[in-house]
Structure formats: structure tokens, C-alpha cells
Image (spheres, rainbow, N blue to C red):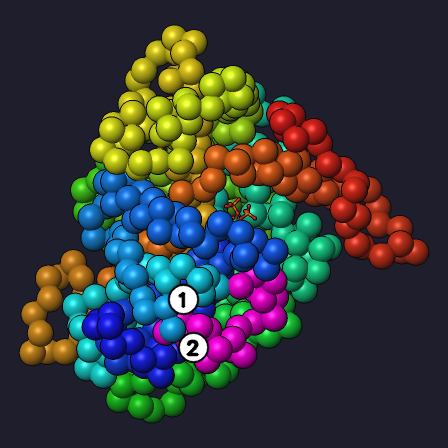
Amino acid sequence: MELEKMDENEWKYHGEGNKSLVVSHVQHCQVLRFLKFPMELVESNQASEAFCHLQNIVDFGKHIMKPLLGESYVHYGEVVQLPLDFVPRLFLKIQSERPESRCNKIMDTLSGYALCLPNLTRLQTCHFIETQPTLCIEIKPKCGFLPFSSHVSKEIKRRVCRYCMYQRLKVANGKWKKISKYCPLDLFSGNKQRMCFALTSLLQEAQNNLKIFKNGELIYGCKDVHDCLPDLNELAQQLKPFFFPANGLHCKMTVINELINVITTALLSNSDSCRVGDMRRSHFSESRTYCEASHFCKDILRNVKSSQDLKKKKKKKFLYKLLVSKMLVFLKIYSLLPPYCGVTLSLHFMSCRKSLLQIDGPYNEIFTENLLNFHAEDDGSVEYAATKVQQYRVAMTAKDCSIMITLSPYLQEEKPEQSTVINASKSRFAFSVSILDLDPKPYENIPNQFKLDGKIVNYYLKSTQTKQDPASPNIYKENEDCTLVLHAV
Ligand SMILES: O=P(O)(O)O[C@@H]1[C@@H](OP(=O)(O)O)[C@H](OP(=O)(O)O)[C@H](O)[C@H](OP(=O)(O)O)[C@H]1OP(=O)(O)O
Ligand SMILES: Nc1ncnc2c1ncn2[C@@H]1O[C@H](COP(=O)(O)OP(=O)(O)OP(=O)(O)O)[C@@H](O)[C@H]1O
């Protein structure tokens, strides 16, 4: 990429989330990821802080998430400075393609900084787009286990996962139209039957948890609640040349089942080495491995070994690793409360401590070593409390990340390693797995997470325990049921 010769016509809108907007190069396997800001903050110094913010994201990916999750999965990219006139032109070009629900934030057109990353919807071995057809499945799996701490005060949290509980609140709020049958515990179970059920449920109700790209173009998934592309027939048509290259008649479900099997195989593939082994594994046995709200047949659920299998037999599996890093949440909100309060109080009296404790970075090797020191004893120090808070923040990042599985029909003349090939019934694929959206979560956001957790649990209990009054619509009122901001829930 020649930074001084940037042409907006060589870039197109690719996608966005809550915090960033992504454009992809029409020819090269590259994307630019821009920060987004709420409208009212655009004129303030937010934009000028963009460089530090982006550099922190890169460092966090490089020094923390990459060692934790594995070398080959994490692509942290680099901060690039773009010509100042290029970004506003690009903004004008793509603005009309943005989903309405995301337009409450504006992309950063002032700082001139962005992250340059490989386009993960393309196979990472090819540098030019036109070389090979690719299929990419992006899954945002969310949190795949139930808390087991003795501090859990609301018993329901031990039985129903956060995702399933949150579904009710999201539908009541109008964020999505229908409750999804997807449950992260099914996906992370390591049990093929449950994983297939989870993936089928994602295909039926994709929400923001599933996207499918063909040759880098979004062909399946919801941009927002009003703009869903959930046509399975159309999807099967698009997928057919990948799974049944010799043509012939194949029904929709045959093609979709091929897709589901290939995704399951990729998720259960062996992973490369990482620091997850340092973490406490014993907590697996303490946690229940199925969620009571899962729509997967409940009788079968009680009999399958699921996560125990994943634990005993599949420590090297990609899925296991992701689950364990999410399990850093074993600190959970309850036991996090004392350290969080301790750190906040200490910062209140000595604001200079913020940099000493590396709350906003730098996310370097020292930060990583402190973070992974799980065996330290609680000596009552603010440093110990800060480590606990940082572990929680890393877990929050892992909870919110996405997985991208990229497949490309395997060409006979290429000789990829066996471990990077997946066999379907009538085709073979070279594949890669990547993890994206590994940004550090702001320290300041912790109280909001507490508050949201309380709302989710309260709304779930209310909607499942009381009979719906037919006269009152099922609309959640913002001022109801909020637990105290720092209340253990
Ligand atoms: O808190 P959650 O579970 O709703 O997760 C948020 C996501 O909502 P989801 O439930 O996946 O639709 C939310 O996703 P959407 O904007 O809803 O697509 C963001 O990922 C948000 O992260 P950030 O604050 O932008 O860094 C996520 O927030 P945090 O991970 O920062 O809490
Ligand atoms: N390196 C990449 N290659 C290809 N596509 C990408 C890449 N990075 C991001 N995307 C696409 O852009 C979308 C938005 O990116 P991302 O998830 O990083 O945004 P975000 O604002 O941080 O999300 P969130 O709402 O979860 O905070 C992703 O869902 C993915 O489809």
C-alpha cells in the first residue's frame, strides 16, 4: 500500500461494529479499520488521541492476546497515517452503505490514523484477491460457560448462560425480532451434535453472531434488525459450487449440512502453542456444562459429556483455548468487586497511579507477565487488585471477540500441511482460523458492565417467572429493574 497515493476508489465499505468501521481494498488482501466516535465527541480531543488509542490496540493484540490465544490466530496489524484529504473522500464514498443502526457514530475523519490489517475474509496465504475463490464464516460466539464461583448470588446464573438470558432483553428492547436458539455452551461443548445444533441455530437467526462472506463480499448475515439477509435457499445456491463442484442436484439442507460439518471440523482443529496452559484448568470441573435455556434437547443434554470431553481429550483444540481464555472470567463480577473498588479508590487519591498500574497501557511484556501471574497471593496491595482487574478486562475482550474461518478449495498443485486441509464429502479445502476484535475494553466501562449484567438477570427472571399480562406490551422500561451500579449480582 503506497500511503502517499491513496485513492478512495480502490477501497469499499466492508463492515462495522460499535467502535470501528472497516473498508477493504478492491484488489489487495488488506483492510483499513477506522475508529468511530459518537457525534457529540467528534470536535473534542478524541480524534487527536486516535494514534495512542490505535497503538494501544496493536500492543494489546501483540503482547497480550497473541501469546494467550496463539501465534497464527491473531493479526494485530499496524497503525498507518493516511493523507488527510483521502479519509473525508472515503467517508463520503461509503457513508450511504452504512446500516442505519450504526450511523449514530461517525468514523474518525480528522486524525488521519487507521489500522491496516490483512483481510481475514481471504485466505492468508494469498496476497492478491483474484487468485482463489474463498468462503469465510465469521462467528461472534460470546461467553461459553456458566459461572461457578461461590460468590454468585443469583442462582439463575449457574443454570442459564448470559447469552440466553440477554436474548429476552434484546427482543424486548427491539434490538432483534426473534429469540435465537443459539447457545454458546452448545457451540463450545466439543460435542459434535450440540455444535451442529448451535450452528444451525445461528444460520436460522444470525443476529450479530454470524456472517458469511464469499470472495470477500457479505452474502449472509444481518447488518441490522431492519436489514437481514436470512435466505437459506439463496445461501445454499451460493455455497453449492464450493461443496459440490461437479454440479448435479443437491437439496438445500445437504449443502447447508456440508457447511456446518466443515465449520465444526475447523473449530475442533488442533491449535498452536499459547499461554493458556498457564491458566487454572481445575475450574472446568466445577462449572455446569449445559445451559438450561438451551433449545438443544434437554434429555440428551444431561447425558452428553460435552465440555468434560473438551477438557480431557482436546486441550490442544482451538475451541478449548478460546474457552479457557474466556474463563479468565472466573474472577467474575462478584469477586472482582473488592479489587475494582480498591483500585478505583486508590486512583481517586493518587491519579498518577493510573500509569504506574498500566491501566491505560502501555500493553507491553511487563503487563503480560503481571497478568499471567495467577499464583500470586492476595497481599492486600493495590498492585494485586489491579492485576485482578486487568485479568477481568482481558476476559471481557475474549468474551466479545469473533472467529473467522476462511476456506478455499484445495488445489492439487498446492501442498499445504495436512492440518490445514478439511475434507468435505465432495470437496477439499485449505483453511485458516483467525480471531478478530481483540481490543482492550476501557477500565471506565466496568461499572456499565455490572449494571447491564443486573438488568439482564432481572429482566430474565421477571419475564420467565411472571405470567405476561396480555394488556401490557412486552416492552422493557429503561428505568425498571436496574441493580446498583456496583452491586454484586
Ligand atoms: O456487553 P455485551 O455482551 O452486550 O457486548 C457488547 C456487544 O453487544 P452484543 O451483546 O454482542 O450484541 C456490542 O456489539 P454490537 O454493537 O451489539 O454489535 C459490542 O461488541 C460491545 O463492545 P464495545 O463496547 O463496542 O467494545 C460489547 O460490549 P462489551 O463487551 O464492551 O461489554
Ligand atoms: N481484518 C479484518 N478482515 C476482514 N474483515 C474484518 C477485519 N476486521 C474487521 N472486519 C469486519 O468488520 C466488522 C467490524 O469489525 P470489528 O468487529 O473489529 O468492529 P468493532 O466495532 O470493534 O466491533 P464490536 O461491535 O464488537 O465492538 C467485523 O465484524 C468483520 O466482519
- Is residue 317 shown left or right of residue 289? left
Disc 2: residue Cβ within 8 A of ligand 2's nearest atom: no
As measured in the structure, the alpha-carbon distance from the residue carrying label 1 to the one carrying label 2 is 15 Å
- Is residue 276 shown left or right of residue 106? left
Residue appearing at x 56%, y 53% in the figure: 41
Disc 1 packing (10 Å; few <14; some 14–19; many ≥20): many
Disc 1: residue Cβ within 8 A of ligand 2's nearest atom: yes
- Of 362 and 205, the residue lying toward us: 362
Q: In the displayed orientation, state which residue is furthest to the bottom.
A: 248
Q: Which residue is mark 1?
A: 22
Q: Which residue is mark 2?
A: 89
- Of 400 and 322, the residue lying toward us: 400
Residue appearing at x 62%, y 47% in the figure: 166
Residue appearing at x 76%, y 46% in the figure: 478
Residue 113, position as x, y percentages in the image: 35, 59
Q: What stretch of residues is rendered in magenta?
A: 86-106
